[in-house]
Image (cartoon, rainbow, N blue to C red):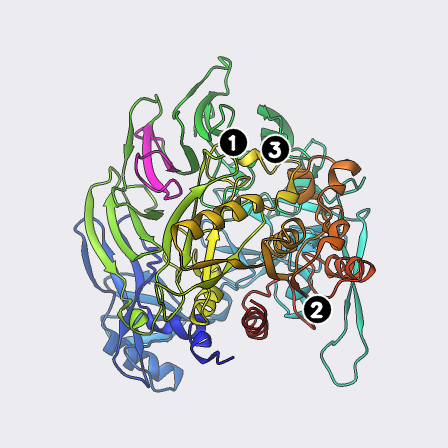
Amino acid sequence: MDDTKAKEMLPEHVQKLAFNLTVKPYFLDEYRFWYIQEIRFDDIVKPRGKRFRLVDSRTGEVRDAFDHDRMAIQLASKLDARLDATDLPITDIVELQEQAIVIMVDNRKFQWNLLDDHIVERKSYEIVADYELMSPDGKWVAYVDQYNLYVRSLEQGDIIQITTDGEKEYAYATLPDAYGSKLVDELAAKKLPPMAIWSPDSSHLFTHKTDQRHVRTMYIEQYVPEGDGVPPKTHAMRYALPGDEHVPLLELVVCSLTGEQVFLKTDPLEMSALQYTLFDPSAPIAWWLDEQHVYYLHVSRGTKSTRLCVAHSPSGEVTIIYEECADTFMQMDFIPRGKSVHVLRDQTACIWLSARTGWNHLYMIQIGSEKKEYALTEGEYAVDAIVQVDEKNGYVYFLANGREEGLHPYYRQLYRVSFTGGSIERLTPENADHRIVFSPELSSFVDTYSRVDLSPITVVRAYDGKLIATIQSSDIELLLAHGYQLPEVFHVKARDGVTDLYGVFIRPVPFEENKKYPVIDFAYGGVHTTFAPTTFPLTAQGRDQMHIAQSLAQLGFVVIMMDGMGTPGRSKAFYDVCYKNLQGAAGIHDHVLGTRELAERFPFIDIERVGMYGFSGGGYGSVRAMLEFPEFYKVAVAGCGDHDNRLYSVEWGERYQGLYDEDIYQQQVSSTLAQQLEGKLFLMHGDIDDNVHMHHTMRMVDALIHADKDFDLLILPNRGHALSRDPYVIRRIMKYFTQNL
C-alpha cells in the first residue's frame, strides 16, 4: 500500500493549504471587534502569517487593529526576541483604545502607551488562567483547588477561600467523574474551570456540591504508565450505569465572596453524564436574572420531564415555574448552538423551546398569574436553538432548519420573530449553513456561512439582516490544487420509502467513470447529533467527519456519510425512531438501503464491496452493521464502541432506552449476535478510555471467541476516547480496508 498521498490529506497537512476559514470575533464594545486574518505567502519556508484586524460595524470599515511593524519593535524589546510583524505572538487583545493597547502574550500581559511609544508589563496576578472563571466586573476569578472553591483578586492578587468542607467525592464546583475524559485530563495535569456562574454584580457564585459518595466505583487499568519499569496502575472512578440506585447528585448552593453559603431548599438534582453541568458555557441551563434570582432547568432522570425553577438566592427558596413532560425523551438540556429557554427580565414570561406538536418550536409562556401561552413559531420545520433575545424591541432571534422550500433541510438559518408572534423574518439569505455571533447589545451580528462545496464567507449584518460588510472570504486555491476532493451532497429514501435522508460522498482519486470502486460508509451511531457534514470540511464543525475520508478516497474508495432516521434536526417522529432502539445505531438499516440506491444512481459504486468504520457510537454501529447485515457489509473497523449499553453511562442509556428494563436493554447488546459475523472485523480501543471503558470491546472479543469467529484487535496503551485523530489508528484503518476490501 502506497499511502503517501493519502497521508498528505490528513489535517496536519491540508490545514496549511486553506486560509481564513474562520472569523472568531472578539468584541471590544458594541460596535468594534477584532479577529485574526491569515496571510498567504507563496513561500515554502513561511507559507502563512497573520494580522490583527479591527471591524467597525457602524460603517463596515475593516482595518489593521494597530501598526504591526511598530508593535513588533516594541514587543521584541520586552520579550528579548526577534519578532516578525506578520507573525506576532499575541494571544489576546484585552483593550484597544486611542491612547493605549493592552495585549496578552501567552501568560504575560503588556500595555503599549501609544502617546509615548512605551510598553510596560502588567502584574502577574492580573493574568487569568484557563482554569479560572472571571467575574462580570473583571475584578475576580474563581477556581477550584482541593475540592473547594476559591476566588482571587485581579487587582491585588489576594486569595479568598469560599468553601472549606469539600472532599474528594463531595466536592464543590466540579464535574462528576463520568464527564468523558477525567483520567486523560488528570494524567495530562489539565485543570478545569469551576462549574459555576457569577451573579451580575460579581458578589456571588451559583454552583453545586457534587456528591458521588454512593456512586458505583469502576476501575481502569493503565498498562503502560509513564516511567521505565513502572508496573501497571489501577485508576478508580465513580461511574453510574442504567438502573443504578445511586447516581451523582448536585446540591445547589449560592456562595458569597464573604464566605457565606446558602444551599437551595430543594432535593439534589440527579446528575447525568451528558448533562455535564448546569453551567456549560456553550449551552447553559442555569443563569442569574438579577442579583437575587437564579433560574435553572431541572431535567428528570430518563429525561421525560423538564422543569423551569427559580431560586431566591438570599433565602434559598425554590419555586417551580413551569414543567413539560414527554412520552419519550426531551433534549432541552442539550442544545449545543444556543439555549432552550429565556426568562424575560421582568420575570412575567419565558420563551420555551418544545417539540410538543411534533416539531421543535418556540412558545411564549406566561409565568405570572395568567398562566397562558401561545406559539411564536409553527410549521413542519425545526427550531434549532434560541440565539439571542432582544427584550427592548421585543424580538427572538433563533436558528432553524427545514423551513425554506428547496433548501437543504439541515442548513441552519437565522430568523427573528416578534414577542407577539406573527410573521417570521429570515435574516440570512445565503443558501448555506450559518454560524452566528451577536454583538453585546444586539445591534449587529457576524455570520460565517459555508457548505461542504462552498468555502466559508464571513459577513457583518445589522440586527434586521441588512448587509453591512463582507469582511472575509476564504482561500482554498492551494487545497484544491493539492487534490482535495470537495464532497458531493446526495439524498436517498429511508426505510419507509417516503422520507428523504441526506448525506455526502467523496469520489476516489484518480477517478474513472467506467471503473467500479469499493465504498466505505463512515458512520456514527450516536443518536444525539447529526453526522453528515453541512459546513465546509476543514472548519471546526466539519473537520472530524472528513479527515480520514479524504485519505481513503486517495486510496481508491468512495466514502459516504449520511444520517439515518433516529437523529435530530427533523421532526420529533423522525428522531423518536431511536427511542428504545439504540440497536438501530442511528439508522443502520437506512444506510444499507441508501447505499444500494446510490449504487443504482452511480454505476461506479461497487455494491459487492461495502465497508464501514466509526468511533464510539460509530464503533457500535460498525459492529452492529456487520452482525445484522453480514450479506451487505464485508469489512468494518470499530473504534471504542459502546457495544453493551447496560454497561455504559446512565444518562445515555436511560435517555434513549428509557429507564432500565432488562428485556429492552438486552436487544442492543451486540455480543449476542457474535455468531452472525461473516466478514472482516477490526476492533480498537484505548486502555485508559474513561468514557466508553475498554470492557465494552473485551466483552465483544469474548463473545467472538466463544462463537469461534476470526477478528482483528488493537489495544492502544495510554489512549483515551479520542482515537479518530491518532496517526497510528488512521494508518491501520487505511491498511485494513486496502487489504480486505
Secondary-structure class at tag 2: strand
- Residue at (20%, 59%) from the top-left corner? 62
- Residue at (46%, 56%) from the top-left corner? 560
Counting residues from the start of the chain, the first of labels 2 and 1 encountered is 1
| Residue 531 shown left or right of residue 406 in the figure | right
| Residue 423 shown left or right of residue 717 in the figure | left
Q: Quadrant of the C terminus?
A: bottom right
Given the image, on which type of amino acid does mark 3 rest?
Phe
Counting residues from the start of the chain, the first of labels 2 and 3 encountered is 3
Between 221 and 178, the one nearer to me in the picture: 221
Secondary-structure class at tag 1: helix
Residue receiving disc 3: 329
Instruction: Give the CA separation, mark 2 to mark 3.
Output: 36 Å
Residue extent of the magenta highlight: 391-417
Residue receiving disc 1: 572
Given the image, on which type of amino acid does mark 2 rest?
Leu
On the image, the x and y values in percent for residue 70 come to 24, 77
Instruction: Give the CA separation, mark 3 to mark 1.
Output: 10 Å
- The answer to which quarter of the image holds residue 484 is bottom left
Q: Are marks 2 and 1 in contact (CB under 8 Å)?
A: no
Residue receiving disc 2: 713
Between 401 and 179, the one nearer to me in the picture: 401
